[in-house]
Structure formats: C-alpha cells, structure tokens
Amino acid sequence: MTRARSGIVCFLVATALPRVGLPQAAHPAPTADYPPYAVPRLSGPTRPGLPDVTGRIHVDQFGYLPEESKWAVISDPQRGYNADDAYTPGARLEVRRRSDGHVVYDGTPRVWHNGAIHEDSGDRGWWFDFSRVTEPGEYYVFDPSTRCRSPVFRIARDVYYRIMREAVRTYYYQRLALPLQPPCADAQWAQDAALLQDRQARFVNAKDDPSTARDLAGGWMDAGDTNKYVTFLGDVIHPLLYAYRGNPAAFGDDYNIPESGNGRPDLLDEVAYELAWLVKMQDDDGGVFIKLGNVDYNGTWPISQDPRPRYYGPKSSSASLWMAGVLAHAARVYGEFEAWQPWAAELETRAQRAWTWYRANPRDERPDTGEIKSGSANRSQVDQDRMEAFVAVHLWALTGDDALHDTIRRRAPQTRQLAEGVWSPYEAGAGEALLEYTRLPQADPQLRTRILEHLARSAASPDWAPEASADLYRSWVSPNSYHWGSCSVRASYGFLALQAAEAAPDQLPRLRQRALDMLHSFHGVNPLSMTLLTNMYAEGAELSPMYLWHDRWGMSAQPRNNPPPGYVVGGPNQSFGGKSDAEQNVDWIRRQPRAKAYADFNLGWPQNSWEITENAIYYQALYIRLLANFTYPSESPRQATTREPL
C-alpha cells in the first residue's frame, strides 16, 4: 500500500508556527497533523534572518568541540507519528556561517545502509560529515535543494560549559527546605521553602508518637516527587563525584547557587547539600533509616504550601550499606579541600559506623512496606551482595583494612558488570568503583586482570559498543533499554565507552567517538529532533521538552509548560503503560517505533506521563557523568556566555 505523505519542503513553508510565549524562548505549538502531545514539528522561520529550519537535519543543537568529528544525520521518517514528514536531501549540503551565510564547507550526504529503515526509529536516512569545519563560531547545515537549514550550532572549546552549568543547577531547583529566590533562582521559578515539616518527621510505624520526631529537613527531591530515598543514591552521588574527579576543570564556582564564589566547585557544594540531609538519616547506633516522604498522594501546589505530615521508614541493612559507600567516597573527595577536611573526617566516621551496623545486623529485603509513597526503596539480598563490592572499594581505599579487600575479592564477581556477558550499563554509576579498584596500588592482580579483560571484551562486542554505522543516529543502545528512564541507560553507555578505552587503549578513537555520539543524541541527534534537556532555548536549542512530570514544575504549576532549563527527561519508553480517557488520547504512544515512544506532556493518572517525562536525580547524574568528559572552561568568561541573540 502506498502511503500518502505531506512532505517537508522548506521554501514552501513560509508561515511561522504559532508560539507559546516564554520569557527567553519560542517553543512550537502542537502540530495539527500530529497526535495529541507529540513533540512538535521543528520547521519554519525560528531564527530571524536565517532560512527556515527543518528537524530532518539533525545536529547537536548546542554544538561541537573544534577538534572532534562532526556528523549531521538527515532523516526521512517512514513509520511513527511523523511518518508523513517526507524529506530527501539534495546532492550537496553546505555548512554556512550564521553571521553572514558564507559557505565554509560543502559535501555529499551518504545514504545509510543502502536506504534501509532503521528499526528503532522507523526512519531511513543519510549522514553528512563536516568534520573539516573547526573554526570557532556559529553555523548551520544548509540544503540548497529545499532551502532548509539545520538548527544552529556552535563550535568552541567551551561549547558545553554552560550546558553543564544548567544541568548541575537543576539540583538547586530540587532543593527542599530552602527558599528558591533571586538572585539564585530566576524570578519565574521563585518559590518559598518547601516541606519545612520535615524538621518534625515521625516514624511511620508510630505516627502519633511525638517522641519519634526527627529533623530530616533538606536534601533534594528524588525526582518529580518530593520523597527522599537513601538506597536510590548509589547512581547519584557516585557518578557526580566521579564526574568531578575525572575532570575538575569541567566544574566552576560560578553556577549562581547560594554557595557560588566560595572558592570551591559548585557541583561539590550542591552534592554537600544532599549529603547534609543524608547524614540526618543515620541513627545514633549507626543504622540508617531507609526513606522519608508522604503516606498519600494528596499534594498541593505550590509544594511550599503542602501541609501534610512527613514520615520516615525503619532502619535497614540496605540503607546502611548504601550510606557507607556514599559517605566513604565523599570523605575521600571532600578531604582534598582544607575547608571541608573536618567534615570529611566526620563522613568517614559515619561511613564506618554504617558499615559496622550493616555487618552486625540481619540483612532485610522488605523493610519498605510501601506505606510511604511511592517508589520502593527495598533492595534484595542479591542487590546487597553486589553493592558490598562497590562499598568495600571505597572503604578499603579510605582505610586500607584487609578484611575489606577480602570482601571485594568475594563480591566483585557477583556484580552485574562482571557476572553478565557484557559490562552492564545498569548500576554503572556505582559500578565505576571496579575500574577505580584496578588503579589502586594493592589491587589483587588476578582480579584487576579479570576486570580489565571483561571490559575490553565488552568494548569489542557488537552487542555493547558497535561501530557508529550500526545505528542511523550513531548512538546504538540495546533495544531492551527503551524503558522507563531510558535516558539513564543511554548516558551510561556513553561514559562506559570511555571507561572501556582504559581497558582497550587501541580502541580509544572509536570508543571516544561513541561517547561523543551518545552525548550528541541528548542534544538533538535523535528521532525526536529535540534536545532531551528541558527549556534550553536560551542556550541555543531550537526544540526542547517543555512539559515535565514534576510536583514543583509540572501539571499543577503556573504555567505548566515552563520548567527550569537543564532537566534530563526520562526518555522514550516502549513499555509505556499510560491509558487514554474520554478527553486525553495517549494510546498512540505505544504504537510508535521504540525510539519515538515519547510525548511532551505532564498529565496524571491514567495517562501516566511520569513514565516518560519525569526527571530523576539519577538520570541527571549519569548525564553529567557523560558530559563531564567533554566540558572545558572558557579562556574568557565573557566569551563563554556569548551567543548571538535568538
């Protein structure tokens, strides 16, 4: 059967789409011939004085490092919600300078896989290599045959510095018990301090007993919800600390958070805010309470006016274990700063006490009954076995205790990274401890070899790190990873490629390119033609998500489509379980190719937008871990903040 296709011919699309009025950006209105809540079509005159844009020419909408390779992907959708957006590029494409339209490079697009349809997206396409363009500046790819251009992009060494700044600042906007007010908060996102009742949180099994009240205020919202979980922090704190350790220059002291200007990296200041809450979750005997939150879903907006009492869960082996690892790692990092050294010593003591409590008490699997909403903080015995290996690495590096080394030898083979056929992208943030172990002077030679050889085998596997040509969008992930929170797996594949290069140095160029291509996929080189970070128009994006499932910035917010910039969304979810009702149709999402199973919306039950658009502090941390590998400060602070007007 022949499909009727509307086509995209830019020189015939002369009328600007209606725009949602935002302070710094213009987000396309819903596209009439797309299903409800679909990501809008990127087309039309979005930049004054420039040709019309098309989302069919995919580039990193923030830009590229000068010395790295640069590829545009041109797509012709065949399946999915945008299947009628026909596009065939001309025989030659150009790279034009934004300022004057001068052609700095031209070349021929190369068809991908002889015109095959890419299974994940339902698109066919072409690649266009413009790596020869290295001069710093702003550019776009232009197709003379259709007179369409790509989104504008920047080439500069510091191209990702401000992107990192916004990504880290989302943690500031996750803070509880702190007023979000100018000058740190933009006026449009200013709010009063929320959940100050956490200062009098009570034990969930003794709600009417005031003697159980504890001050558990502070910390970050875990995700779009306001609950706080100890056992969720393994893939939050560890990757953030590794991001800093891997490239301290990526993180400035100028992120406009309350601690900015104190002479210490704002990333570590932000993590310290979460750690200050975390230590409150430890009881006097060293045991750690598993969870803090609400016992119902009757929230109000703004959350600063939510009056509900808050409750903490019981002490648990898993919470104590997770805390031991996080605090031991943090003690090593914060101990490098003179101003933080007394606090680092306290963190070390607390880590050892949590480990001692964990070893002295029976391991539990279901201390979280679910009465405190909503995610389960429970961890199985198998989960705890794996985490023991990571925790023991940090404690052993801190103390040199031989008993901890025995634990590493016993538990490391049980981790997903070593037990599975290829190095797992799950638990990857905490799992970086295994690679760190190989660098420790007293590491067991046999275990060191096993770790590095398995990582090298994974790097050579087409089921883990295939050539870029395996994927139309140059960013292959396992087909099974398009699930709730798929962006976290995508980020993990990216930074793991660079870790694998440590085990397979001869593969460094290919693996570095894989990591870069994963980063570009977050920035617009994806089937949605959209950055996967919210509201990044002020940083050069031409299409960003504007609907976030979030108690603070989501469905109840005013307006509901203007979250702060830099939040990583959950991502496409082929297992999306939301249902349509009489007024809101979302059933079409499940019928999409897996990489298009996404919509820009923040509806509640039964549409369940949280399965797609909710941010989580762990998604954010894993993206930051990837981004840190390619973030460099500007030689001139003024240069770092300058882009041509939108």
Image (spheres, rainbow, N blue to C red):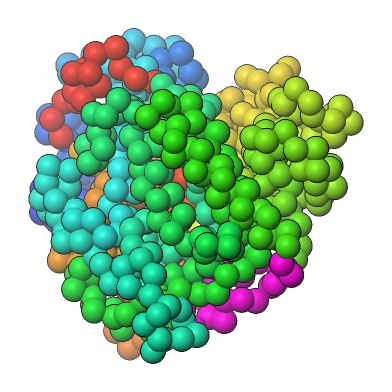
x 44%, y 70%: residue: 292
Quadrant the N terminus occupies? bottom right
| Residue interval drawn in magenta | 361-380
Quadrant the C terminus occupies? top left
Looking at the image, residue 503 sits to the left or right of residue 564; the answer is: right
Front in this rendered view, residue 105 or 631: 631
In the image, residue 369 lies in the stretch drawn in magenta:
yes
The image quarter in which residue 627 lies? top left
Front in this rendered view, residue 113 or 517: 517
Q: Residue furthest right?
A: 446
The image quarter in which residue 430 lies? top right
x 66%, y 65%: residue: 317
Q: Is residue 566 above or below residue 520?
A: below
Q: Is residue 194 above or below residue 324?
A: below
Tag count: 0
Looking at the image, residue 138 sits to the left or right of residue 182; the answer is: right
Residue 196: image location, x then y, percent: 25, 67
Residue 465: image location, x then y, percent: 68, 36
Residue 219: image location, x then y, percent: 37, 56
Q: Is residue 67 visible?
A: yes
- Name the chief secondary structure element in magenta: loop
The image quarter in which residue 612 lies? bottom left
Q: Is residue 274 above or below residue 101?
A: below
Front in this rendered view, residue 289 or 9: 289
Looking at the image, residue 203 sits to the left or right of residue 407; the answer is: left
Q: Is residue 121 visible?
A: no
Front in this rendered view, residue 13 or 469: 469
x 35%, y 43%: residue: 270
Residue 562: image location, x then y, percent: 20, 56
x 64%, y 35%: residue: 398
In the image, residue 79 lies in the stretch drawn in magenta:
no
